[in-house]
Image (cartoon, grey):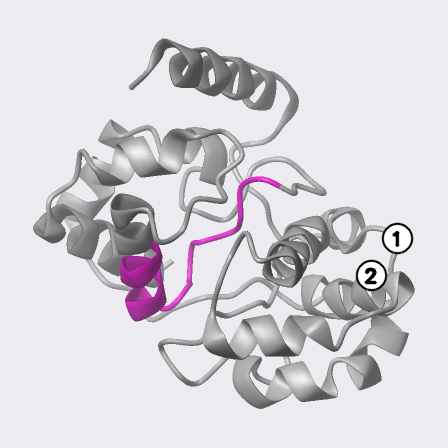
Amino acid sequence: MSNTSKFISAGLTSVFLATASAYGGDTEAEIKQRIGSGNPVAGKDKSAMCQGCHGEDGNSMVPSFPKLAGQYATYIQRQINNFQTGTRRDPTMTDMAATVTNRQDLNDISAYFASQKQMTGTPVKNEAGEKLFNKHGCLNCHGEIGKGRPANNAIFPVIGGQHKDYLVKQMNDFKTGARDTDMSGTMSELANQMTDADIDAIAEYLSGQ
């Protein structure tokens, strides 16, 4: 890891450890915080096209489509902006993101998905994956079981309960440089320290949270 990345990572970690709980949840206060400035009621109708892939309540049924239920609204907004500017690329999402031209619509859509109960998976016992998750310090940014750490977080997403296939693909994309939108610069370096087996184990562990 470069000195710059170490400095950024250490700084972010110290802030999050000092100001946030072990991981996020679904209390009324936590849901209110992660919704942000959008209107989730209005966002339900506005997100109709999104629901075709991501599920009516943000829990997609297709492993390659990410779950959005309980994701930070600001994180969703940032990813849409990345697709719109071309800094993140996907054949489907690039076109879909281009249709969201109104800022309030984006705030409302992201608030709707953020207002749902956090994504969960079928519990999987994977001690190797859990050890690797902790060894690489993933919990410092994503929370102890991947359920998120700070509220209204535009940088580090909720990943606990996410589809395994989606997590594996994103880790491999960070590893190859196909995805390079990590603001801290940490994900690429971490992914390149992991074998395919490591990535598979961590993804399986997280998918069961």
Residue 111 visible? The answer is: yes
Point out the stretch of residues depicted in magenta: 155-170
Residue drawn at 29 percent across, 69 percent down:
165
Residue 58 visible? The answer is: no
Query: Which image quadrant: the C terminus?
Result: bottom left
Crowd class of label 1 (few under 14; some 14 to 19; many from 20; radius 10 Å): some
Crowd class of label 2 (few under 14; some 14 to 19; many from 20; radius 10 Å): many
Q: Is residue 1 above or below residue 22?
A: above
Q: Is residue 160 magenta?
A: yes
In terms of depth relative to the viewer, which is nearer, 23 or 188? 188
Q: Position of residue 196 (x, y in %)?
A: 12, 52
Q: Is residue 11 above or below residue 89?
A: above
Label 2: element kind: helix
Marks 2 & 1, CB-CB < 8 Å contact: yes
> Circle 2 is placed at which residue position?
107
Query: Which image quadrant: the N terminus?
Result: top left
Residue kind at label 1, given as amino acid type? Ser
In terms of depth relative to the viewer, which is nearer, 1 or 94? 94
Q: Is residue 46 above or below residue 94?
A: below
Residue drawn at 17 percent across, 53 percent down:
201
Residue kind at label 2, given as amino acid type? Asn
Q: Is residue 63 magenta?
A: no
> Circle 1 is placed at which residue position?
37
